[in-house]
Image: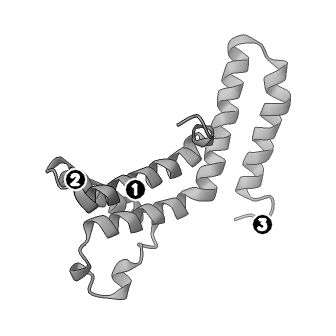
Amino acid sequence: MQDRPTTLELLAAVRDFVTRHVVPALDGSRRFHARVAANVLAIVERELRDADAQLREEWAGLRALCVPAADVSTPDDDVPPADPAVLRAAVAALNADLATRIRSGDADAGAFRDDVVRHLRATIDDKLRIANPGYLKEGCR
C-alpha cells in the first residue's frame, strides 16, 4: 500500500486529465467514449470513497426492518460484519428477506410500509450518489 498519492488521488488525476485534455482533443464517437471513460473513473472514485459507509447504512436499515428486536441477543448483533464480502452477503440476504415480506403483502399499508419506503428511498439516494449524483439535483426527481 502506498502512502501518497492515494488511490482516490490517482483516479482523480486520471479523470481530470481525460476530462481536460483528452475529451476536448477528440471528435465524434471517440469524444463520447472518452467522456464515458471519465464518467467511469468518477463512479469508481465515489464508490471507493463512499460505498463502505453506504453499505453499512443499508445493513442497519435492513436489520431494523427485518430482524425483530427480540432476535437481537447481544450488542454485537447490531454491529455490521467487518469483512466487506461478509457484509455484502448479509445485505443481499436481508434484501431477499425484505423482498419476500414485500411480495407477501407486509408492506402494503401501515407503519411497516412507511418504514420500507423511507429505507428504499434512502438506499436509492445513496446508490445514485455513487452512480450519478446529478439525478439527485432539484428538478431531476
**Which residue is the extreme one toward the front?**
110
Residue 11: x and y in percent read: 73, 47
Residue 61: x and y in percent read: 39, 64
Q: Horizontal placement of 104 versus 93: left or right?
A: left
Q: How are the colours assigned in the image?
A: one colour
Comparing labels 1 and 2, the label whose residue is closer to the camera: 2
Comparing labels 1 and 3, the label whose residue is closer to the camera: 1
Residue topped by disc 2:
109
Inter-mark Cα distance, 1 to 3:
39 Å
Quarter containing the N terminus: bottom right
Using the rendered view, name the quadrant where residue 116 is placed.
Answer: bottom left
Residue topped by disc 1:
118
Q: Are marks 2 and 3 in contact (CB under 8 Å)?
A: no
Using the rendered view, name the quadrant where residue 28 is placed.
Answer: top right
The first of marks 2 and 3 along the sequence is 3
Work out whether residue 84 can be spotted: no
How crowded is the residue under tag 1: few (<14 C-alpha within 10 Å), some, or many (20+)?
Answer: few
Q: Are marks 1 and 3 in contact (CB under 8 Å)?
A: no
| Amino acid tagged 2 | Ala
Residue topped by disc 3:
3
Front one among 50 and 62: 62
The first of marks 1 and 3 along the sequence is 3
Front one among 109 and 137: 109
